[in-house]
Image (cartoon, rainbow, N blue to C red):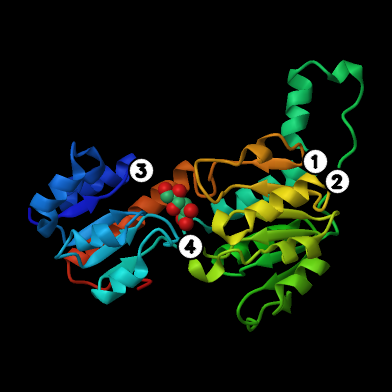
Amino acid sequence: MSAKVLITERLLASCEQAIIEKLNGVRLYEQQDPETFLKEHGGEFPAIAGFAVSKELIEALPNLRLIANFGVGYDGVDIRAAKDRSIAVTNTPDVLSEAMAEITLGLMVSLARRLPQADRYVREGRWPEGPFPLQNQLTGKTVGIVGLGRIGKQIAELCQAFKMRVVYFGRNKQADIPYVYYDNLVDMAGDADWLVVVTPGGAATKNLVSKEVLQALGPKAYLVNVARGSVVEEKALIDLLQNGGLAGAALDVFANEPDVPQELLTLENVVLSPHQGSATHQTRFAMGALVVANLEAFFAGEPLLTQVV
Ligand code: 8YV
């Protein structure tokens, strides 16, 4: 068996198993001394499976021709370094859209109705003291979606099921889309009760949701980020949440995961989630299968299924 795939970090167990059994995969993260391992064996790997692929790693693999990214977002891959060497990159789109949309609406309901606090209220035996305070509702509110791609569209559909008005911001107005388009994010924030961030990460969107955007969103509105921490100006977000400049935030992603800023941990108007967007059995299984299918297509000399570079 000659195909050789370098598994750069821990992936879904069944995905790793398939890569090891079918494609002669090797776990880099299990090597005692990864640097020495790469020096001795780097030339043996035409393909990578993983999601954190640096320029240094690419340079250590002189025969690399494919990076099969585990995830739809590929901001963890040094795309410039890959392009410079004409290395192809694949990702895992579509299969995670429903899971992403489900968690987004779950976070919104959790934040609006304070579900984590309500759960604590019951567990702490406080219900007999009196009713839990009244909360807010999604019905009839406007949701502004930042990035109306495949996941954004799924979120929009679920928001419509919740009887919300949907508007969106993106680089271009899309044809055949029934939602109002904004080409200016500050303007859209001013029109939204909820801002849902679902745009790709990376340099192009760094701090796209700036202090100005958050201020335009305002004291009665909520932010939801299921994209990447880098897209939102985290310091400004914390300041506004602390001083009443925003009603609340639901965050599945952070600038420096898995570290979460201490200030967020103490705020009651925040719901926190440890990057769980795609983390269901069925979705992670489908993502793993797509990674393997791309690798198999590559080694069979067939067209890649979901090539992004
Ligand atoms: C991660 C994600 O890739 O698909 C994405 O872009 O953020 C996630 O699905 C996943 O957590 C990697 O294990």
Front residue of this view, candidates 47 and 218? 218
Viewer-side residue, 23 vs 54: 54
The first of marks 4 and 1 along the sequence is 4
Please tell me which of labels 3 and 4 falls first in the chain.
Answer: 3
Checking the image for residue 94, the label placed there is 4
Q: Quadrant of residue 116?
A: top right
Give coordinates of residue 4: x percent, y percent: 14, 55
Sequence order check: which comes first, mark 2 or mark 1? 1
Q: CA distance from mark 2 to mark 3?
A: 38 Å
**Is disc 2 in contact with disc 1, using a CB cutoff of under 8 Å?**
yes
What is the three-letter code of the residue carrying label 1?
A: Arg
Amino acid type at circle 3 is Leu
User: Which residue corresponds to mark 3?
Assistant: 12
Residue labelled 3 has its Cβ within 8 Å of some atom of ligand 1: yes
Does 113 appear above or below 25? above
Q: Residue at x 75, y 44 (%)?
A: 111
The answer to whether marks 2 and 3 mark residues whose Cβ atoms lie closer than 8 Å is: no
The kind of residue on which mark 2 rests is Asn
Q: Is residue 46 visible?
A: yes
Q: Report which residue position mark 2 lands on.
A: 136
Looking at the rendered structure, the secondary structure element under dot 4 is: loop
Residue 113, numbered label: 1
Q: Earlier in the sequence, mark 4 or mark 2?
A: 4
Q: Nearer the viewer, mark 4 or mark 1?
A: 1
In the rendered structure, are the residues bearing label 1 and label 3 in contact, judged by CB atoms less than 8 Å apart?
Answer: no
Measuring from the top left, give residue 300's x and y in whole percent. Answer: 17, 66
Name which residue lies at 63% across and 75% down.
170
Which element type, helix, strand or loop, lies under badge 2?
loop
- The spot of residue 65 in percent (x, y) is 21, 68
